[in-house]
Amino acid sequence: MTKSSNKVYSKDVKIDVHYLTRVEGHGNIVVDVKNGLLTKCEFQVIESPRFFESMLINRPIWEAQHITSRICGICACGHSLASIKAGEDALGVKPSDEVIMLRKLLLYAEQMDSHVLHIYILVAPDLLGVKSIMPLIKTHKPIIEMALRMKKMSDYAGEVLAGRHTHPISYVIGGLTQLPSREALEKLYKLMLLARKDGEETVKIIKSLKFPEFERPTQYLSLTSDEEYAMYDGELIVNGRQRQKVSDYKKLLTETVRDYSRAKIAAINDKPYAVGALSRFNNNYEKLNKEAKLVAKELGLKAPCHNPYLNTACQLIEWVHCLEESIKIMEKILKDNLSEGKVVVSSWPKKSEIGKIKYKPNTGTGCVEVPRGSLFHEYTIDKTGCITFANCVIPTNQNMGNLEEDMRKIVPELLAEKTQEEITLALEMLARSYDPCISCATHLLDVKFV
Amino acid sequence: MSKIAVIGIGNTLRRDDGIGIEILESLLKFYKRDEVEYLNFGIASFDLLHKMQDYEAVLLIDGIKAGLGPGELKIFELKNIKYDLKGPSGSTHELNLKDILEFSKKLKLKTKIYVAGIQVEDVSYGDGLTDKLKRSKQRALDEINEFIDVLFSSVIRKQFS
């Protein structure tokens, strides 16, 4: 139970938001305050478990990315890439530099796609005082059209690179099954250049909006790299100091189950932590490109930032970063041309090889930064190349404990001056700022009958 | 780029909710036209909204709950439907078709949007259509194919008028 500073306000507040709107999936906010004392504060994930880790058992490792991309329709590319990296780690496959470049391009496209949806469709209505995007179509039509245009660009990128953005097809272990066409890449490049203006407009819009003020320092986990703003590869880092190899992620973070939630809760050093754009910004600010740093300055953001509501602003900074990095990669690809020999692979062992190849039983781990944070896929394979164990640690799982701690801090701070309706809105906005992907989070629940 | 797209929507893991996808696949198998683009959009998302803008006309095929007999088909133009959205949209990562169509109306998209709605009976989790939908599927398929012919002809006539 938590007192609001040293004063006890004789105030009762009961909040029960069933099915929080403008997030992916189904979650409830439950808060109970009696006589100014916070007695209950939960973010309940009530989405059904989806058993993806179980589905992977006894499946060939080559199928894993096609199965696990179905965990989500928004971060499907991220799941595919984490899955592919885990498979390559287990098999000892090393992709070419060209393939890695194409993977980064796909990942950046997904970051841009998800971030623009979150900024404009999920968060902006709160900042403009409306219930949903629908009224904004009338009052802010050119801005909504711009948001759709920005989303269309990154959706097209997924189509060009991987066959489709939702549940990508051509990205597999070792490479791609098909080269993107030059004509489509040229069209994509032009769209990216045009998108710069939309990014500038978006910065002006976000700068004009007021985000709630709230701070709670926490542990921030992300990938980090000496070469770049890490999204595709690197090692793990917490608060810019504590480092860990990706393959040893279980030495760093633990997952537990709470009886009111179908998503596991993760902890580092037995305490909650955050992942996502804010964590990446805090850990890796110096590695942002100059255009993104300018946006950060424009928005008045400095690292470290401890306001979870500003995760949305960090997403905009990342959108600009990803766009500029994508343009650089596209210029290289169009200048040098992609080499089929270095990129294209079969998605499966050849028919003549099936049953004849002996694999070394091994465990592999893949981690990428998806829009909502660090995503881990870990697989163990047997000598036939089939999966005997799978574990997926999802960003939203990792954020749930931290979200609840934020809720436990903010409620007492708001009690004195805010009405129940205002506190409810503040909590809804707080949950939305994490951009939770609840369907992703409910992938497996271990059940033990006692 | 084709001027017309036929877009199947639905969840094949929820029995009759997959009727839109099944009809789409049958159109591709038996009545495919090179001038028409056929798209499987699964459970509709925001991407459907901006994809539709690429065409002069789209025909969305989906299961509907409209108080009709199971398997009954109704084809209508979007502008002729009045939606009544009560309260804010639930989840915009999985917009339902009603939200997307309402969005496109409010944005005044130039694309002509038609909906071929087939009344569903059972959309619980499960494989395959119910018997009533299985029996009605061929008739619905033929009517939708005829509609596509008419739609195609009208788009071509407009091009040359």
Image (cartoon, helix red, strand yellow):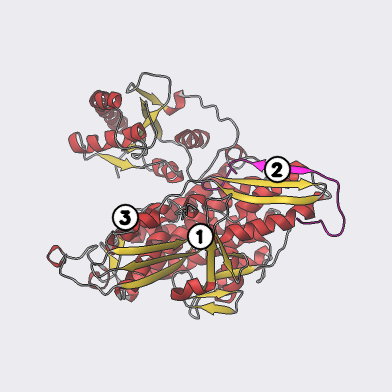
Q: Please give the residue where the numbered disc 1 appears in the rendered image.
A: A371
Q: Are marks 2 and 3 in contact (CB under 8 Å)?
A: no
Chain letter belonging to callout 1: A
Chain letter belonging to callout 3: A
Q: Is residue B60 above or below residue A278?
A: above
- Position of the N terminus of chain A, as image quadrant, is bottom right
Q: Please give the residue where the numbered disc 2 appears in the rendered image.
A: A15
User: How much space separates mark 1 and mark 3, taking CA atoms?
Assistant: 20 Å
Q: Earlier in the sequence, mark 1 or mark 3?
A: 3
Q: Secondary structure at mark 1?
A: loop
Residue type marked 3: Gly
Residue A354 drawn at (x, y percent): 16, 65
Any part of residue A93 in sight: no
Q: Secondary structure at mark 3?
A: loop
Residues flagged by tags 1 and 2 on a common chain? yes
Residue, x 29% and y 23% (percent of image)? Answer: B132
Q: Is residue A85 above or below residue A76?
A: below
Q: Secondary structure at mark 2?
A: strand
Any part of residue B62 in sight: yes
Q: Nearer the viewer, residue B142 or A402?
A: A402
User: How much space separates mark 2 and mark 3, taking CA atoms?
Assistant: 45 Å
Q: Nearer the viewer, residue A257 or B106?
A: A257
Image quadrant assignment for residue A12? top right
User: How much space separates mark 1 and mark 2, taking CA atoms?
Assistant: 29 Å
Label 2 CA crowd tier, 10 Å (few <14, some 14–19, many 20+): some
